[in-house]
Amino acid sequence: MGLFNSHEKKVIAELCKKSEDISNDISKEINELFEDLKTDYEENKIVLKEFTAFVSELETKLSPQDVEKLRSFSSRLYKVKRCAKKGVEAMRELARDQKKATKETIREYQEYLYV
């Protein structure tokens, strides 16, 4: 004698399919956002290096106070770059965790269906 009757198995199978579809849609959206963010980061990560080189060129033409302001600004831009990199890494982890959660949820549904 099975744990579930055929109607209950059908409901569980439908819930499994719906859950899988929703999870796959979320995973797809996370992956797309991750790729967009990663692409934007890769395209713009050189900006800080270029800005630092530009500041170096200007150092001889500016007053010491202005040079210090530019260095301070460069330092803050570096912090922005680190935040952006952390954002890319967080999106990568989120994508991985979502995929893992989806697989686990599907596995749990299948355990109930085929017990």
Image: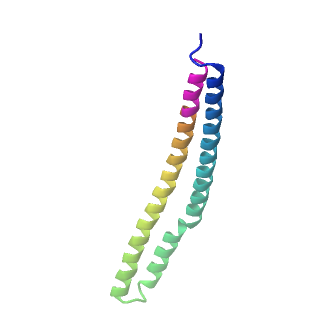
Instruction: Tell me the residue at 59%/19% (across/down).
Output: 4
Q: Quadrant of residue 66?
A: bottom left
**Where 100 sits versus 13, above or below?**
below
Asked if residue 49 is positioned above or below residue 57 in the image, the reply reads: above
The C terminus, quarter of image: top right
| Colour logic | rainbow
Q: Magenta part mainly helix, strand or loop?
A: helix
Q: Residue 95's x, y, as percent?
A: 55, 46
Residue in the foreground of this view, choosing between 13 and 95: 13
Quadrant location of the N terminus? top right
Span highlighted in magenta in the image: 105-115
Residue 62, position as x, y percentages in the image: 40, 89
- The extreme top residue here reads 1
Residue 63 position in % (x across, y down): 36, 89
Give whichever of 31, 88 is nearer the camera. Answer: 31
**Residue at horizontal 43%, vertical 89%?**
61
Query: How many numbered dots are placed on residues in this image?
Result: 0
Q: Quadrant of the rendered structure where residue 107 is?
A: top right
Q: Nearer the viewer, residue 111 or 64?
A: 111
In the image, is residue 111 part of the stretch drawn in magenta?
yes
Q: Residue at x 56, y 67 (%)?
A: 44
- From the viewer's perspective, is residue 68 above or below residue 100? below
Asked if residue 90 is among those painted magenta in the image, a careful observer would answer no
Q: In percent of the image, x 58 and y 51: which residue is there?
A: 30
Q: Nearer the viewer, residue 63 or 38?
A: 38
Q: Position of residue 14 (x, y in %)?
A: 65, 33
